[in-house]
Image (cartoon, rainbow, N blue to C red):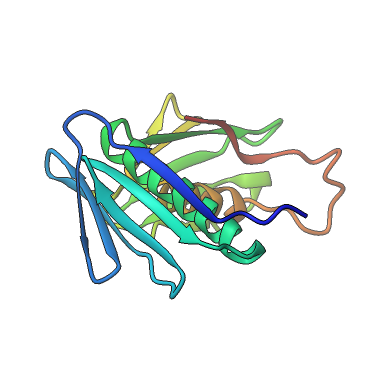
């Protein structure tokens, strides 16, 4: 196996995006939207060079090489999140009983799934400033935000609230499903 003397990932920040590093905490911001995350490791470091972020490791082992790549991916996602944002689209699918979707505060309610009398509830753990959930055309749900992990977890919470147990999934396919990630 080839030994590397160092590994370096350069993440170019989009136009108008600023970054700062304090005690291992990296903050990327643009127009009032900011995402902060902690990157601490004794051998892998994050620094600012010429307006770009740089993940660096000297004489990396396999785990440090993997960690440097993961950190670079997180930083790229943070950059994309503050400049463009992330959007997940979900669709409510039903065959017989029409379900209704409502967002009320920090809970999304799914009424009439399989004709159930008790509504299913999905938690929306973040504020509308961080993650926005909208219902369009009665069956389409749009989840948007700057942090990819928060948007993805919110979408997964909605999808998981409609999980069917005790029936054949090939036949009973009603639920709310993620159809597009952008």
Seen from the viewer's position, the closer of residues 112 and 81 is: 81
Q: Quadrant of residue 83?
A: top left
Is residue 117 visible in this depiction of the protein? no
Q: Left or right of 174: which side holds 85?
A: left
Q: Left or right of 91: which side holds 13?
A: left
For the N terminus, the image quarter is bottom right
Point 43% across, 56% down: residue: 56
Seen from the viewer's position, the closer of residues 130 and 109 is: 130
User: Residue 182 at x, y = what percent?
Assistant: 47, 30
User: Residue 181 at x, y = what percent?
Assistant: 52, 32
Q: Is residue 80 above or below residue 162?
A: above
Q: Is residue 67 above or below residue 149?
A: below
Point 39% across, 42% down: residue: 10
Point 86% across, 39% down: residue: 170
User: Residue 24 at x, y = what percent?
Assistant: 30, 68
Q: Left or right of 52: which side holds 71?
A: right
Query: Seen from this angle, which residue lies furthest left?
Result: 32
Is residue 120 visible in this depiction of the protein? yes
Point 72% across, 52% down: residue: 2
Query: Seen from this angle, which residue lies furthest top?
Result: 137
Q: Is residue 139 above or below residue 111?
A: above
Q: Is residue 40 above or below residue 122?
A: below
């Amino acid at each position: 196996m080839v030994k590397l003397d160092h590994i370096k990932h350069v993440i170019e920040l989009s136009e108008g995006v600023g970054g700062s590093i304090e005690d291992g905490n990296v903050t990327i911001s643009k127009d009032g939207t900011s995402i902060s995350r902690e990157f601490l490791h004794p051998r892998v470091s994050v620094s600012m060079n010429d307006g770009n972020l740089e993940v660096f490791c000297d004489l990396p082992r396999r785990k440090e090489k993997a960690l440097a790549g993961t950190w670079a991916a997180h930083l790229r996602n943070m950059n994309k999140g503050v400049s463009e944002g992330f959007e997940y689209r979900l669709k409510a699918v039903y065959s017989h009983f029409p379900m209704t979707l409502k967002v009320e505060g920090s809970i999304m309610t799914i009424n009439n799934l399989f004709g159930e009398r008790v509504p299913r509830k999905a938690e929306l753990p973040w504020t509308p400033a961080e993650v926005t959930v909208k219902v369009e055309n009665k069956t389409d749900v749009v989840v948007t935000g700057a942090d990819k992990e928060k948007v993805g977890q919110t979408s997964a919470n909605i999808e998981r609230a409609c999980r069917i147990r005790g029936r054949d999934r090939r036949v009973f396919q009603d639920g709310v499903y993620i159809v597009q990630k952008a």
